[in-house]
Amino acid sequence: MKFDLTPLLRPHIVNLQPYTSARDEYTGKEGIFLDANENPYGSVTDEEYNRYPDPYQEELKTEIAGIKNVKPSQIFLGNGSDEAIDLLFRAFCNPGKDNVILLPPTYGMYEVSAGINDVETRKVPLTADFQLQPDLILKETDENTKIIFVCSPNNPSGNKVEREDILKLLRNFHGLVVVDEAYIDFSDEPSFTNYLNEYGNLLVMQTFSKAWGLASLRLGMAFASKKMIKILNRIKPPYNISGLTQQTVLAAIQKVDKVNAMIADILQEREYLRKEISQLDFVEKIHPSHANFLLVKIPNAGHVYDDLIEEKIIVRNRSKVQLCEECLRISVGTRAENNAFIQALKKIHAESYNL
Ligand SMILES: Cc1ncc(COP(=O)(O)O)c(C=O)c1O
């Protein structure tokens, strides 16, 4: 399907003049730099951070392109995926007029970002086994619907979403389909980046926060058409990715073997945790997971959550979330952490029934 991005954009974004720095005009590394009011003596720290970083992260994008099988021009880097989510609202959604479609239960930031940007959210719940209802979703759209947010593997349920259903949205929706793949590294499912050249309305998000173990650095990726990436680059804060993050991730990318070993460990622990929890007769359901967490249905989940906190074990209470009633979301920990969780769960259950 031929896709024209421009009519979807907020009108003032089409002609917006982005911030430019002197380094956009002079890209050489050698010279006497008296353009950016930096400190010429260096930094107060042992490492030197006195110069502003590359605003478009070219070196890092070249490396990421290599491991993700996309072109550098198809990559946007944000201060976490959350920055990309916010920029999408700012680029495409007119406050008080446009709307987006959310598919609950799903990742909470889509709704928060919509709220910050004063954009209406229309909700089409997932099915009981957390799959899309594409026909209902499409029915809910109108000419002011700008984005559909799909999360696969889904947070908080952990399952992967049927590929054909997402493709149906891509083929039949006039606006953007965002596929959030924050947990894709824990799944056997191929990435939707494979469809970037086919669908101009596709934007895929991934992150260094999960499998790569770099949550504190804040580095999220968005993959889309060259035109869409240009828009995001025009509206982002000029130096949104710190030099320290760029350098650290450049080095991290050379350690793909270590990442793969950590993923293998997490998958093994996910299975261990699943087996151990499945042996507790009071547990009602463990939802199948393609992510690094399990969604588990337990009677009185809210109380169990509070009791776990007393034991200094913190999980995510999803017991009041639609379709996740009485459920806790448990991140896969190390073997020792997983065992501590299981022991605490057994103890809480025994105490509450005076066993
Ligand atoms: C589905 C999903 N998308 C995005 C994020 C945020 O990622 P980042 O740390 O890159 O902002 C999370 C974090 O939990 C998530 O669950």
Image (cartoon, rainbow, N blue to C red):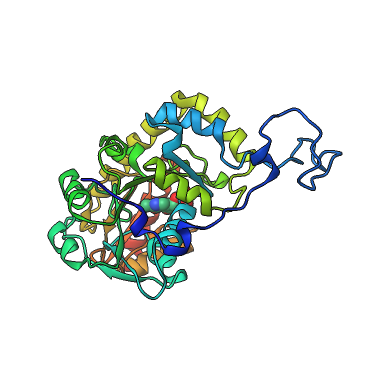
Residue placed furthest toward the front: 15
Q: Is 261 placed left or right of 150 in the picture?
A: right
Which quarter of the picture shows residue 194? top left
Which quarter of the picture shows residue 224? top left
Please name the residue shown 59% across and 49% down the image.
Answer: 240
Residue placed furthest toward the bottom: 96
Q: Is residue 211 visible?
A: no
Please name the residue shown 49% across and 39% down the image.
Answer: 213
Image quarter where the N terminus lies is top left
Q: Can residue 190 be seen in this view?
A: yes
Question: In this view of the protein, which residue sits in the foreground, 333 or 129?
Answer: 129
Please name the residue shown 19% across and 44% down the image.
Answer: 163
Q: Is 138 placed left or right of 310 in the picture?
A: left
Position in image of residue 82 (x %, y %): 46, 55
Residue placed furthest toward the right: 41
Number of dots carrying numbers:
0
Position in image of residue 126 (x %, y %): 20, 60
Question: In this view of the protein, which residue sits in the foreground, 259 or 202?
Answer: 202
Question: In this view of the protein, which residue sits in the foreground, 339 or 46?
Answer: 46
Position in image of residue 124 (x %, y %): 22, 66
Q: Is 83 placed left or right of 283 in the picture?
A: right
Which quarter of the picture shows residue 183? top left
Question: In this view of the protein, which residue sits in the foreground, 148 or 351?
Answer: 148
Residue 123 vertical position relative to residue 333 in the rendered view, above or below? below
Image quarter where the C terminus lies is bottom left
Position in image of residue 144 (x %, y %): 29, 68
